[in-house]
Image (tube, grey):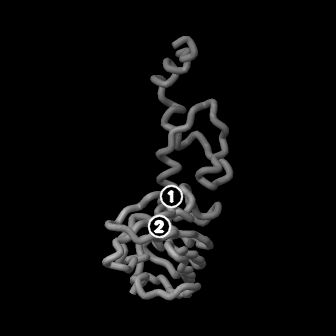
Amino acid sequence: MYNISLKNLSFGVHTYAYELDRKFFEAIDGDEVRKGNVKVVVNVKRTSSTFEFDFELKGVVQVPCTRCLDDLDQAVDSRNCLIVKFGKEYAEESDDIVIIPEEEGEINIAWFLYEFIALTIPIKHVHPAGECNRTVFSKLRKHRAVSKDEEETDEDLGEEELTDEGDPQSGDPRWEALKGLNFEDN
């Protein structure tokens, strides 16, 4: 379904449209994304020696929240390019140039589509403040270690104020001995 035959493609621009749904993400078996609904338009322009692929991807994918691991909707809106050339064997010359065997004459773009989507997902993807799973969030908050020098608020956890109740360092005298160490002399 995601194979594009290039051998018999005439000169000019050719357009292909796909809708990536749960079946696509399950079949591709990638680590980042397992569900989603993304519309893809691929324009392939054949020139004398190359094929220029222009990908436009728009939609939403579900990824696990970095903080609570519940599903989080992540918008996808991306434009990507890929240059394909014929050669003797398959090779990726760079991130955007691919050589495919001329005798095969076709390219499967499924993995490229998945990679373009995965690259749009930020490294840290979390729910807006207050929308994380409360059970997981309370456990995370309880087991979090905070030094006395740190600010009492925690933007990473998405909550307003943290108290020292869950801080294991606050009542443990062993931490007091370490506070006097000077690491700048080393």
Residue 66 position within the rendered picture, expressed as x and y whole percent measured from the top left:
50, 58
Question: Label 1, on which residue?
Answer: 66
Q: Residue at x 51, y 13 (%)?
A: 186
Residue 3 position within the rendered picture, expressed as x and y whole percent measured from the top left:
39, 83
Question: Label 2, on which residue?
Answer: 115
Name the amino acid type tagged 2. Answer: Glu
Few, some or many residues within 10 Å of mark 2 (<14, 14–19, 20+): few
Nearest the viewer among 11 and 65 is 11
Residue 143 position within the rendered picture, expressed as x and y whole percent measured from the top left:
47, 45
Query: Of callouts 2 and 1, which one flags the residue occurring earlier in the amino acid sequence?
Result: 1
Query: At numbered mark 1, what does the secondary structure look like: helix, strand or loop?
Result: loop
Quadrant in which the N terminus is drawn = bottom left
Nearest the viewer among 122 and 6 is 6
Query: In the displayed structure, does residue 139 sit left or right of residue 43?
Result: left
Q: Residue at x 39, y 77 (%)?
A: 108
The numbered dot on residue 23 is none
Name the amino acid type tagged 1. Answer: Thr
Query: At numbered mark 2, what does the secondary structure look like: helix, strand or loop?
Result: helix
Q: Residue at x 64, y 63 (%)?
A: 128
Instruction: Please determine whether, in this image, residue 157 is positioned above or below residue 164.
Output: below
Few, some or many residues within 10 Å of mark 1 (<14, 14–19, 20+): some
Nearest the viewer among 170 and 181 is 181
| Residue 28 figure quarter | bottom left
Instruction: Please determine whether, in this image, residue 140 is positioned above or below residue 120.
Output: above
